Image: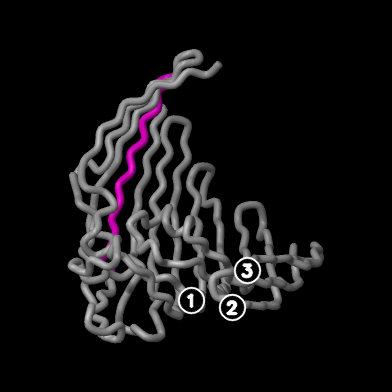
Amino acid sequence: KFISSNFLLSGNKIVDYRAGFNLSYGQLSNNGTAYFLMFPTLKIFKKIGAFKSINFEFNKQLKYHSFNDVFEEIPFIDPYFRNFFSQELKASLSYRHLLTQHLSLFSNINYINVEGHAVPFLYNLYDLIRINPIGMYLADCKGFDLVSSLSWAGSVYDVMLSLYLNSIKSNEHFNQLFIANKINTTINIKVLNGLNIAADFYYTGEKDALRLSPISDNNISYVALPSYFSANLSVKYMFENMIFSLNLRNLLNQRYNTFDGYYEDDGFKFRLGFSYRF
């Protein structure tokens, strides 16, 4: 069972604000472990002139993670893995600036402290007891991350360049980086009336993964998962009630080694689509 409620007061004197507290209670059915959390919540928003704004948020939440939620992200997870809770504290400061009529900048820096962050690790591949060798290791993590984007919105094309950097580390595995840094560029072009082309170029940096020895659960080693660069291209044409689409995924035919021997994408994909709106 899981119950969560927010009790907030809001106003707009000098700044727009919402202040209060979050009350959460959860209990796991498999072992009866209960969790209770009451923590203050604060959100402040200030518009600076006509083209700038700044936003600050501070909160801590109890989050419930079901097996189904984890399975959607990692379908080859150990089937014996159970539901779990995490406590996530977050302090966030964001800034938005409309530089010109078409060009805008957005930056967001966060401090994150998570108790019970799920880190995938690899079981021994020859362990026949476990059907799927990807397990989940709950670790406490904290650190900063930065999300920044620069976007151009025009009448014919839109371009967005985004960057994600982080220094989030586990308290137990301080020298390992489990969350990769990323750079992404998206271009949307309106070629003709009803015809749109979208291109997505992305780079994902190197990150670390855990390996668990079959001899002892305490015998943990690390492996570096390589970085990769690739791109996607899609074309969509709308004619009356019909929609035709062409999707080219992973143009550089990369193998995304995201979970130490398991691949999220095993190469180039070509898809044609058609839909009709009644």
Percent of width and height locating residue 128: 23, 66
Say which residue label 3 marks. 56
Q: What residue type is labelled 2?
A: Thr
Which quadrant holds residue 22?
bottom right
Q: Main secondary structure of the magenta part?
A: strand
Q: Is residue 229 in the magenta section?
A: no
Circle 3 residues within 10 Å: few <14, some 14–19, many ≥20 = some
- Label 3 vs 2, first from the N-terminus: 2
Mark 3 secondary-structure assignment: strand
Please state which of residues 201 and 118 is positioned toward the viewer in this rendering: 118
The mark tally for this picture is 3
The kind of residue on which mark 3 rests is Phe
- The secondary element bearing badge 2 is classed as loop
Residue at numbered disc 1: 116
Depicted 251 relative to depicted 83: above or below: above
Q: Answer left or right for 78 relative to 11.
A: left
The label nearer to you, 3 versus 1, is 1
What x and y, as percent, mark residue 170? 39, 80
Tag 3 near tag 2, CB within 8 Å: no
Residue type beneath disc 1? Gly
Label 2: how many residues lie within 10 Å, few (<14), some (14-19) or many (20+)? Answer: few
